[in-house]
Image (cartoon, grey):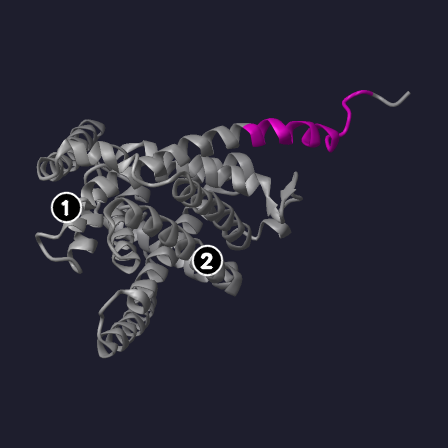
């Protein structure tokens, strides 16, 4: 979900050194992801893993897939607001009010995130926004960084509100800590930029701070509709994931919801294996283990349930790529009609 800071920073080191570090980081990520997955599967009988895909009924699978697909439309709606696409260019077409060009970018970006290791799919967003939406790359990078900040904020808020069994004073303390962290971030950033005003920024941290400042200064980024779309997206996605986890593991729905949240928060880990395998399952298991006895039957099915949900995500990613191709084909005639003819008038 959240890209590591180095993803959008400028690397000033030698190409050989950068290539060596990149290979080492990729090897560590694959080793971590596959090692975690192997350890989790060693504690789960293979029969349970196979049963996980046949236990839910077709209505549960359909509900989960529908929830995930609708969440893509909500992400596209947020992108429309955050990039102010209505004031930038005319929509080629709309589906239920959602611009197809924004939806195409979201679908292609989501497919890349799910299928590429090390969160490398995040890097496709600036390219897609530039090619499909005509946005400057720097604006797209700031937009992506801001959307990831929104994602983290909303996930923490949902966790504080819905996490089962959390005392009320813990919830209040959590919201207070978020408020203080926001104020501190604003003060630190203002102080840092005041000191760097007359200097040429260099380094990865400086590049990240500049992009963060760009994101914070964009008025569209703070539009209430952007926050509402983010809240609706994550509420629907977590609810859909909890339905499938609960159907496979037989755990209570709220416990499964905590597992779905744990899986999403696991994406913050900078080292991600291929397609997120290992870290996602570990996050789901940790979220459910916080509310289930160590020897419970539901917890023993948590890993197989997480695998089933993860495969569902990947299927949606492949379907998203196919839908994006259809959107590209469907938009071509309308784009051509809007293009002035190259021939001279008779």
Q: Nearer the viewer, mark 2 or mark 1?
A: 1
**Mark 2 → mark 1, Cα distance in angstroms:** 31 Å
Whether residue 142 is visible to the viewer of this picture, yes or no, is yes
Question: Which quarter of the rendering shows the C terminus?
Answer: top right
**Helix, strand or loop for disc 2:** helix
Question: Residue at coordinates 84% horizontally, 21% vertically from top-left?
Answer: 344
Question: Residue at coordinates 56% horizontally, 28% vertically from top-left?
Answer: 326
Task: Answer few, some or many: residues within 10 Å of disc 2's Cα (few below 14, many 20 plus, some between 14 and 19).
Answer: some
**Relative to 30, is 220 above or below?**
below
Residue named by callout 1 = 300
Left or right? Give the position of 275 relative to 324: left
**Relative to 331, is 126 above or below?**
below
Of residue 48 and residue 180, the one placed in the foreground of this image is 48
Residue 196 lies, in percent from the top left, at 31, 60
In the picture, the disc for residue 232 is: 2
**Residue 102, quarter of the rendered image:** top right
Segment colored magenta: 326-343
Left or right? Give the position of 14 relative to 342: left
Whether residue 202 is visible to the viewer of this picture, yes or no, is no
Is tag 2's residue or tag 1's residue first in the polypeptide sequence?
Answer: 2
Residue 267 lies, in percent from the top left, at 26, 47
């Amino acid at each position: 979900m959240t890209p590591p800071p180095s993803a959008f920073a400028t690397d000033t080191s030698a190409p050989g050194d950068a290539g060596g570090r990149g290979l080492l980081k990729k090897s560590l990520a694959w080793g971590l992801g596959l090692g975690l997955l192997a350890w989790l599967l060693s504690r789960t009988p293979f029969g349970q893993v196979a049963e996980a895909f046949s236990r839910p009924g077709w209505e549960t699978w359909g509900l989960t897939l529908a929830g995930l697909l609708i969440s893509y439309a909500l992400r596209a709606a947020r992108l429309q607001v955050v990039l102010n696409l209505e004031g930038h260019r005319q929509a080629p077409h709309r589906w239920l009010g959602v611009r197809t060009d924004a939806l195409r970018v979201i679908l292609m970006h989501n497919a890349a995130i799910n299928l590429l290791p090390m969160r490398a799919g995040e890097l496709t967003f600036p390219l897609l926004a530039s090619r499909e939406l005509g946005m400057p790359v720097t604006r797209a990078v700031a937009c992506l960084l801001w959307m990831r900040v929104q994602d983290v904020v909303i996930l923490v808020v949902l966790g504080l509100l819905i996490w089962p069994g959390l005392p009320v004073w813990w919830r209040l303390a959590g919201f207070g800590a978020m408020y203080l962290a926001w104020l501190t971030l604003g003060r630190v950033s203002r102080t840092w930029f005041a000191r760097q005003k007359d200097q040429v920024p260099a380094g990865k941290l400086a590049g990240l701070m500049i992009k963060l400042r760009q994101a914070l200064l964009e008025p569209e980024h703070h539009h209430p509709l952007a926050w509402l779309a983010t809240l609706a997206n994550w509420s629907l996605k977590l609810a859909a994931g909890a339905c499938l986890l609960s159907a496979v593991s037989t755990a209570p729905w709220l416990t499964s919801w905590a597992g779905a949240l744990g899986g999403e928060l696991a994406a913050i880990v900078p080292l991600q294996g291929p397609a997120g395998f290992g870290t996602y399952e570990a996050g789901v298991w940790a979220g459910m283990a916080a509310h289930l006895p160590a020897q419970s039957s539901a917890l023993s099915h948590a890993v197989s349930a997480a695998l089933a949900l993860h495969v569902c995500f990947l299927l949606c990613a492949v379907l998203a790529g196919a839908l994006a191709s259809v959107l590209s084909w469907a938009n071509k005639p309308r784009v051509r009609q809007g293009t002035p003819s190259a021939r001279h008038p008779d």
